[in-house]
Image (cartoon, helix red, strand yellow):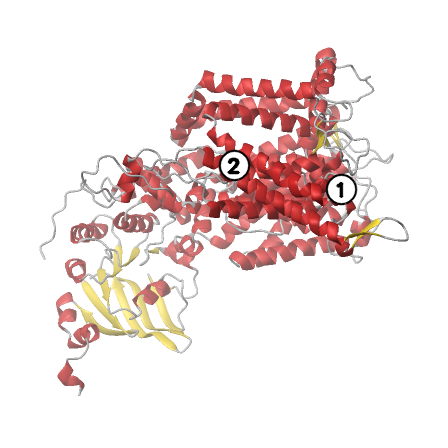
């Protein structure tokens, strides 16, 4: 830190006072920090390279017109690929991050300048050197196999991705000597750009970020945009589609040319990726919108948002119900304007949303860490399968109903009747698993639920019960859910699945919302806060926890029943422990104990990254899904443990000190001096 | 006075080899305020934990209104009409002040999952009653726990107000016997004097019988009908404050033996 002298040296100010009074301190390069961030960047780049992401994602073009001239996986490819992007994004991010400083209340931020750019470049250059070091080591290890003439690597065995493809990609097929100067330079310049963003005025920076985000997303989500624009265009050209409410969107109708086909061709290249003209168009539009947005609203949006949250809960009801109504309407209309891919995506998000909402009651509200939640999903799925599939195990006695007609068709309403049994069995399973488990607390409970989750799956997998559940072969030929005149819900028509899931999610949201504001919800919260005290205050903790467990189980079983009807066949492998973990991650990342958080969490994680087996928006990343989940979870726990959309209470729990400090600054904290009640001090 | 509300006979509890309480005999009459004193480690809090069902005694009996309380869970004890506060304030810190008190009425209310889901008139009526009772209980402490404070989390409260809220929470369970564990600890003289007053009112206005552990002798003197001194898990002395405070064994337990006697 550089030191400055103040003009008015009348009295000696304390360091804090001088910082307030002085002109802003010019930032200087903190080489220690640069070295640290540079090291992190180098490690990150090497790790990502060795994870296989750059090579794996090299198939996908992002910008059609930038040509690094190397295509490992895609000889016909052109343009900047997602693989390069997965590396090049990091220098920009860390270049930005190195300039980050915590400005305390009442302190002045340091003035930004050339030193920030220098620091950014330093970080990037160090990171680039890391990549060079990797290529250099690979180059040393690389030799020609005399027999086959192929290039082989010595340490290929432990490091699967230590191979020629990576070497070619990282050296731009020009050898490590090229990497020596090109990577430090490239990464340095990118990091410099990242650092430079700080020097821009707020409005401009927002516009630039909006443009970049828009360009990258439009390019990455190309297939989705194609799908939506095609759907919208078709609906405009052929409004008749709208009358076909629950029908199959591809119901024999010829594909109608979309009015937007021209626009798509203008923006996207034939081989995928944005054309230069498309990039400029999207960048300019996004930047203009951002600028216009900040000019027109001038913080009015933020102000109204703040006004909304400042209102007491009771008075928010009106605005909240309007918001909810609009959202619901949008969700009902939306599927008409999207194609099959998007609807499939929505259906998957919905299935996991339903699960996450159930788990949110168990974990978020009652504080019971249930790691075997998938068990109830499985029970729902298998119960539906047994009742609505002619292909169920042959050992079932004849009195177990089967809602399939003799010609192997679904019985109208059969799924709904099956659902009644599903609820009953899920509740019973919840009680059976819950009763022994619920007396435990904390970590012990988590481990035991984990065990029970696996037991349920292994029972379905076992040879012992294979006459009933088909063992590893599972149950196939599950009938779709036939609602008679309302339509049929089946996997071939994702839109119908979406509506069914929307209906049940609405129920789950309503249930969570009502329970949270009831006597039961308060008891659950008290148990979460302090179980012994809750019990001493007259709450039967065992019953209350069991009830939370069963409510969660029933919601999960709904999801299982829909899953069964959608997929048409279920196997024990659909109910791996991973499913439990992913639902838990959805709840944690979204914001534990908050319904909106859970919705956002499922949209972000399941919608964008994909479920355990379901592809998300970033289909290309599915191989690295768990890596990204893990990284995201670590980052969240460090930076934002309360989740994306936090529950006010949980957020307080995790930021108690800051919360109290804020309250103190606002004068809301009770300092203990009550002048309000006049009491005579007792004579000593 | 009137009839016995709590009768404890030959009660012992051991943790491993340690006798936390030995052959304790203790009784409380309806409408009494009993002060329990004793040096640190005397077994006072264990005594409370045992009455409230958090610790099971090794032998002896606890009769509350003539019925045995041995083996009941803490929530069943509260249900029967004994409520307590904690020495180290244990509020539900992230629930609001009014919720802290509302949740304590759990065992006195009964609307279940279906009426909550369908928001039935009965449910709404019960919620309104719970809320009204909570505000009434909080109003007992003047203005400092009501008004805008109702919707604030308990964690913003000052130490003294947290103690008050704990008492309010215990009151909300509608007990007949209230166990207060060091209610004025950490309060300044003005605040403890006020609370002493309120403890008197808890009996006269709310009809609670009170057992109170307290180190502040001013409070114990001002409010207790009877004082019990515990040391090493045994009753040292019982009687009025003057009797107990002049008892040589009690003085010895607090201050130690005079030097000349030691030899």
Q: Residue at x 76, y 22 (%)?
A: A249
Q: Does label 1 lie on the same chain as label 2?
A: yes
Q: Chain of mark 1?
A: A
Q: Quadrant of residue A443?
A: bottom right
Question: To which residue does mark 1 refer?
Answer: A168
Neighbour tally class for label 2: few under 14, some 14-19, many 20 plus, Cα within 10 Å: many
Q: Quadrant of residue A555?
A: top right
Q: Is residue B172 left or right of residue A424?
A: left
Describe the element under mark 2 as helix, strand or loop.
helix
Mark 2 to mark 1: distance in Å?
Answer: 29 Å
Residue A87: x %, y % from top left: 65, 39
* Foreground label between 2 and 1: 1
The answer to whether the residue labelled 2 contacts the one labelled 1, judged by CB atoms less than 8 Å apart, is no
Question: To which residue does mark 2 refer?
Answer: A96
Q: Is residue B223 left or right of residue A398?
A: left
Q: Nearer the viewer, residue A182 or A455?
A: A182
Describe the element under mark 1 as helix, strand or loop.
helix
Q: Count every numbered label the image shows and give the total.
A: 2
Neighbour tally class for label 1: few under 14, some 14-19, many 20 plus, Cα within 10 Å: some
């Amino acid at each position: 830190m550089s030191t400055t002298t103040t003009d008015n040296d009348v009295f000696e100010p304390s360091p804090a006072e001088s910082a307030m009074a002085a002109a802003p301190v010019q930032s200087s390069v903190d080489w220690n920090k640069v070295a640290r961030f540079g090291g992190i960047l180098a490690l990150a780049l090497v790790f990502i390279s060795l994870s296989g992401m750059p090579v794996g994602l090299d198939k996908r073009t992002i910008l059609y017109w930038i040509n690094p001239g190397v295509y490992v996986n895609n000889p016909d490819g052109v343009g900047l690929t997602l693989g390069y992007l997965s590396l090049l994004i990091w220098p920009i991010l860390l270049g930005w991050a190195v300039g980050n400083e915590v400005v305390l209340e009442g302190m002045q931020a340091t003035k930004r300048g050339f030193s920030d750019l220098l620091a950014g470049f330093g970080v990037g250059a160090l990171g680039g050197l890391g990549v060079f070091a990797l290529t250099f080591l690979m180059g040393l290890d690389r030799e020609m196999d005399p027999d086959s003439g192929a290039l082989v690597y010595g340490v290929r065995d432990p490091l699967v991705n230590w191979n020629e493809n990576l070497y070619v990609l990282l050296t731009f097929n020009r050898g490590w000597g090229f990497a020596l100067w090109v990577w430090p330079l490239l990464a340095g310049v990118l990091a410099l750009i990242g650092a430079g963003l700080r020097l821009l005025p707020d409005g401009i920076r927002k516009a630039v970020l909006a443009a970049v985000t828009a360009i990258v997303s439009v390019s990455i989500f190309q297939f989705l945009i194609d799908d939506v624009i095609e759907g919208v265009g078709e609906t405009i050209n052929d409004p008749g589609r709208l009358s076909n409410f629950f029908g199959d969107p591809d119901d024999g109708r010829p594909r109608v040319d979309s009015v937007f086909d021209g626009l798509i061709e203008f923006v996207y290249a034939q081989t995928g990726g944005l054309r230069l003209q498309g990039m400029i168009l999207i960048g300019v539009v996004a930047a203009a919108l951002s600028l216009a947005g900040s000019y027109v609203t001038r913080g009015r949006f933020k102000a109204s948002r703040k006004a909304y949250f400042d209102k007491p809960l009771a008075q928010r009801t009106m605005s909240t119900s309007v918001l909810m109504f609009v959202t619901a309407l949008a969700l009902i209309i939306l599927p008409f304007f999207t194609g099959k891919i998007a609807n499939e995506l929505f259906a998957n998000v919905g299935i996991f949303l339903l699960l996450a909402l159930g788990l949110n009651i168990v974990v978020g509200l009652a504080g019971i860490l249930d790691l075997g939640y998938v068990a109830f999903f499985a029970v729902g799925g298998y119960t539906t399968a047994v009742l609505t599939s002619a292909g169920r195990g042959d050992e079932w006695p004849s009195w177990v109903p089967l809602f399939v007609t003799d010609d192997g068709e679904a019985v109208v309403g059969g799924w709904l009747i099956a659902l009644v049994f599903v609820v009953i069995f899920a509740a019973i399973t919840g009680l059976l698993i819950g009763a022994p488990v619920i007396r435990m607390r904390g970590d012990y409970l988590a481990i035991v639920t984990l065990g029970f989750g696996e037991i349920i799956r292994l029972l379905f997998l076992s040879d012992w019960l294979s006459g009933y559940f088909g063992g590893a072969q599972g149950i196939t030929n599950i009938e779709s859910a036939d609602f008679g005149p309302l339509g049929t819900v089946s996997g071939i028509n994702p839109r119908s699945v979406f509506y069914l899931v929307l209906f049940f999610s609405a129920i789950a949201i309503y249930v969570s919302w009502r329970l949270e504001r009831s006597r039961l919800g308060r008891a659950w919260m008290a148990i979460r806060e302090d179980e012994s005290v809750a019990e001493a205050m007259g709450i039967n903790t065992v019953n209350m926890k069991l009830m939370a467990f069963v409510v969660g189980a029933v919601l999960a079983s709904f999801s299982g029943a829909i899953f069964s009807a959608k997929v048409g066949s279920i196997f024990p492998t659909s109910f791996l422990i991973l499913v439990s973990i992913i639902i838990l991650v959805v709840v944690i990342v979204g914001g534990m104990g908050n319904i909106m958080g859970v919705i956002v969490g499922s949209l972000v994680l399941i919608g964008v990254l994909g479920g355990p087996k379901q592809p998300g928006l970033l289909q290309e990343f599915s191989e690295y899904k768990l890596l990204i989940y893990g990284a995201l979870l670590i980052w969240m726990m460090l930076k934002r443990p309360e989740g994306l959309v936090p529950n006010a209470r949980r957020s307080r729990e995790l930021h108690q000190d800051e919360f109290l400090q804020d309250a103190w600054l606002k004068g809301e904290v009770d300092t203990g001096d009550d002048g309000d009640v006049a009491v005579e001090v007792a004579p000593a | 006075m009137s009839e016995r509300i709590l009768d404890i006979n030959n009660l012992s509890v051991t943790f491993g080899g340690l006798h936390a309480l030995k052959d304790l005999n203790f009784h409380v009459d309806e409408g009494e305020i009993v002060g329990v004193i004793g040096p640190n480690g005397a077994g006072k809090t264990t005594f409370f934990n045992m009455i409230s069902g958090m610790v099971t005694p090794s032998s002896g009996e606890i009769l509350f209104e003539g019925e045995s309380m041995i083996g009941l869970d803490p929530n069943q004890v509260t249900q029967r009409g004994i409520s307590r506060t904690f020495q180290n304030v244990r509020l539900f810190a992230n629930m609001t002040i009014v919720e802290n008190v509302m949740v304590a009425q759990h065992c006195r209310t009964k609307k279940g999952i279906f009426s909550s889901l369908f928001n039935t008139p009965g449910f709404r009526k019960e919620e309104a009653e719970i809320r009204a009772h909570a505000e009434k209980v909080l109003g007992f402490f003047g203005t400092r726990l009501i008004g805008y404070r109702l919707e604030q989390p308990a964690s913003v409260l000052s130490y003294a107000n947290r103690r008050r809220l704990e008492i309010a929470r215990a009151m909300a369970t509608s007990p007949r016997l209230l166990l207060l564990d060091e209610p004025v600890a950490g309060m300044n003289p003005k605040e403890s004097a006020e609370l002493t007053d309120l403890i008197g009112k808890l009996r006269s206005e709310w009809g609670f019988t009170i057992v109170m552990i307290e180190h502040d002798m001013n409070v114990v003197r001002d409010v207790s009908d009877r004082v019990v001194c515990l040391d090493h898990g045994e009753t040292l002395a019982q009687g009025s404050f003057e009797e107990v405070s002049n008892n040589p064994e009690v003085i010895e337990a607090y201050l130690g033996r005079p030097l000349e006697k030691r030899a």
